[in-house]
Amino acid sequence: MSKHAVVESDDRASERTAEAAEAVTRLTRWHDDFPTAGVRFADLTPVFADAAGFRAVIDCFAAIAPDADLVAGVDARGFLLGAGVAATLGTGVLAIRKGGKLPPPVVSREYELEYGSAALEIPADGVDLTGKRILLLDDVLATGGTLAAAAALFEEVGAEVVAAAVVLELEFLKGREHQGAYPVTSIVTL
């Protein structure tokens, strides 16, 4: 697929999504009380390590916004997803880093997690983001703070998040309610 890919049929899109969902469901490892008591952690490492599973996820995400100018992945598993989708689409990729990981100047946004708080950063210079159409990727949508903070960073620098996607959505945590006007796609919703 490239930025000039033909539009796929609805049947093929459904088939591709079903392949990705099957791989995610089959390969995800669950860890109770990690990283803190009461949190159930979804380890997607086996999904990404499986060639067919990883390809299915990448293809799903690439089809969401084939006209994106830039793919952005949230630290850290979003980096893997972002690189794969950007290579598929023929775009660049931007890593949205955890606070303190980029040299200044940066644009930073604090947000709440289900088990604490954190900050995300993107470069304030060196990458012209003004007017860019961004496809925003992360691994899991839980309470929604991470994805919303990432989207707010791009809005602050004059870019537009045209779509966001996650591998796994924990619907009971209502993270989708905290997202902006951009469409949010999840491969598996629990």
Image (cartoon, rainbow, N blue to C red):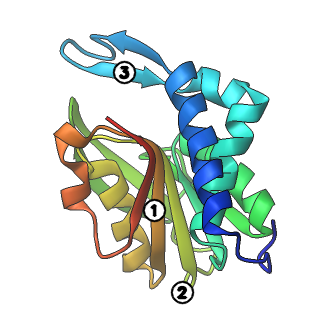
Q: Position of residue 102 (x, y in %)?
A: 55, 51
Going by the numbered disc 2, the residue's amino acid type is Thr
Q: Amino acid at mark 1?
A: Ala
- Mark 2 surroundings within 10 Å by alpha-carbon count, few (fewer than 14), some (14 through 19), many (20 or more): few
Callouts 3 and 1 close, C-beta under 8 Å: no
Disc number at residue 130?
2
Q: Quadrant of the rendered structure where residue 108 is?
A: bottom left
Q: In the figure, residue 126 lies in which quadrant? A: bottom right
CA distance for labels 1 and 2: 18 Å
Mark 2 and mark 3: Cα distance apart in space: 35 Å
Q: Residue at x 23, y 49 (%)?
A: 175
Q: Position of residue 134 (x, y in %)?
A: 54, 73
Q: Earlier in the sequence, mark 2 or mark 3?
A: 3
Point 41% across, 15% down: residue: 30
Residue 169: image location, x then y, percent: 35, 42
Crowd tier of the residue under label 3, counting other residues whose Cα lies within 10 Å: few below 14, some 14–19, many 20 or above: some
Which of the two discs, 1 and 2, labels the residue nearer the N terminus?
A: 2
Residue 41 image label? 3
Q: Which mark is residue 164?
A: 1
Residue at 57%, 20% in the rendered image:
27
Compared with residue 53, is residue 108 higher up or lower down, i.e. above or below?
A: below
